[in-house]
Image (cartoon, helix red, strand yellow):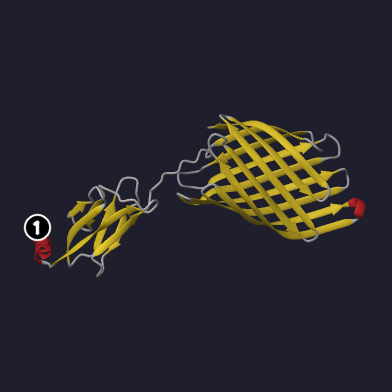
């Protein structure tokens, strides 16, 4: 106990007899560059500090043995600033955020119809977040048919909300598509894509491999292609997502477009898909339930 008191005395005495340096400055919000009143300004490692005034200004005396100021304010990310020879400071604090994902634990059931070739179909969707701050796992399968020779199947496994910050997150999406059309076109496609989401805008990039056969032309293509696309989320009052992408293979292209609309617990979508002579416009409606 005596040793601890002695060390505390030596430490506080060192501060008391250190030469003081005067610092002043202003603290602003990085988003709009407006001054922040009431920001806590503390000499790191001590309880010595002050607050910014109504105009965001502050003054503080710092012992020359210490060189870090800590800035904290409700709703802002705390900042440790290392002092140097500059005595007049401009401090920018970045807004903090807590992001709640509303798709973490969902089960979805859809009925859907191809308006051109495959009038009967359905879709199942499942999403799970194993633990807090983990990516959301999304998986599902859709199937459409004309109850004869035509069928179109799409299965997917995705990891959503990777590398999360207030204004950026990323998804990794993988899928398998299989098509039989009029006993003439057969294809199998494996795709891996990354969706880079900046606020409400998404940039889609990826690679796909396709095995395509067209019997009538004795045409066979096995190729790897690059995928590029864009997407956006439209908030209130529309609550709608829109995306479009294309994959360019050797002598072949594949096109996708989707509009998805939410109304309370009801979801509807309109999808368009085209490859070679096959194209399909699909309309679907369903529910997604939280669990």
Disc 1 crowd, CA 10 A, few/some/many (<14, 14-19, 20+): few
Q: Residue at x 56, y 29 (%)?
A: 264
Q: Residue at x 65, y 56 (%)?
A: 206
Instruction: Residue 259: name its quadrant.
Output: top right
Q: Which residue is mark 1?
A: 5
Q: Give how far across and how far down residue 126 sits, in percent.
A: 60, 38
Relative to 223, 160 lies left or right: left
Q: Give how far across and how far down residue 180 sits, in percent.
A: 82, 45
Which of 45/96 is in front?
Answer: 96
Relative to 81, 139 lies left or right: right
For the N terminus, give its image quadrant.
bottom left
SS category of the residue bearing label 1 = helix
Relative to 264, 21 lies left or right: left
Can you say whether 127 is above or below 224 in the image?
Answer: above
Q: Give how far across and how far down residue 47 sits, in percent.
A: 18, 53
Q: Give how far across and how far down residue 169 sits, in percent.
A: 51, 51
Which of 72/25 is in front?
Answer: 25
Instruction: Residue 57: name its quadrant.
Output: bottom left
Relative to 35, 234 lies left or right: right
Q: Residue at x 41, y 44 (%)?
A: 98
Number of numbered tags placed on the structure image: 1
Q: Residue at x 87, y 52 (%)?
A: 214
């Amino acid at each position: 106990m005596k040793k601890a008191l002695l060390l505390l005395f030596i430490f506080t005495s060192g501060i008391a007899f250190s030469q003081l340096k005067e610092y002043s400055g202003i603290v602003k919000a990085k988003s709009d560059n407006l001054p922040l009143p009431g920001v806590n300004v503390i000499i790191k490692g001590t309880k010595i500090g002050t607050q910014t005034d109504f105009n965001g200004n502050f003054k503080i005396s710092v012992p020359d043995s210490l060189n870090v100021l800590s800035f904290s304010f409700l709703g802002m990310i705390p900042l440790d600033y290392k002092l140097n020879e500059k005595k007049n400071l401009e401090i920018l604090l970045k807004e903090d955020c807590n992001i709640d994902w509303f798709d973490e634990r969902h089960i979805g059931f859809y009925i859907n119809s191809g308006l051109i070739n495959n009038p009967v179909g359905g879709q199942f969707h499942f999403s799970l977040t194993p633990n807090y701050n983990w990516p959301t796992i999304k998986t599902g399968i859709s199937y459409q048919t004309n109850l004869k020779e035509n069928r179109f199947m799409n299965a997917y496994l995705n990891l959503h909300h990777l590398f999360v910050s207030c204004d950026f997150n990323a998804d990794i999406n993988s899928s398998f598509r299989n098509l039989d059309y009029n006993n003439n076109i057969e294809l199998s496609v494996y795709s891996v894509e990354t969706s880079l989401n900046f606020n409400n805008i998404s940039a889609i990039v990826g690679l796909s491999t396709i095995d395509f056969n067209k019997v009538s032309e004795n045409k066979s293509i096995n190729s790897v292609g690059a995928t590029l696309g864009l997407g956006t989320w439209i908030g209130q009052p529309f609550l709608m997502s829109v995306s479009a992408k294309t994959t360019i293979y050797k002598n072949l292209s594949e096109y996708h477009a989707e509009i998805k609309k939410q109304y309370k617990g009801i979801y509807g979508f309109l999808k368009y898909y085209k490859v070679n002579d096959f194209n399909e416009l699909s309309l679907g409606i369903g529910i997604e339930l939280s669990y």
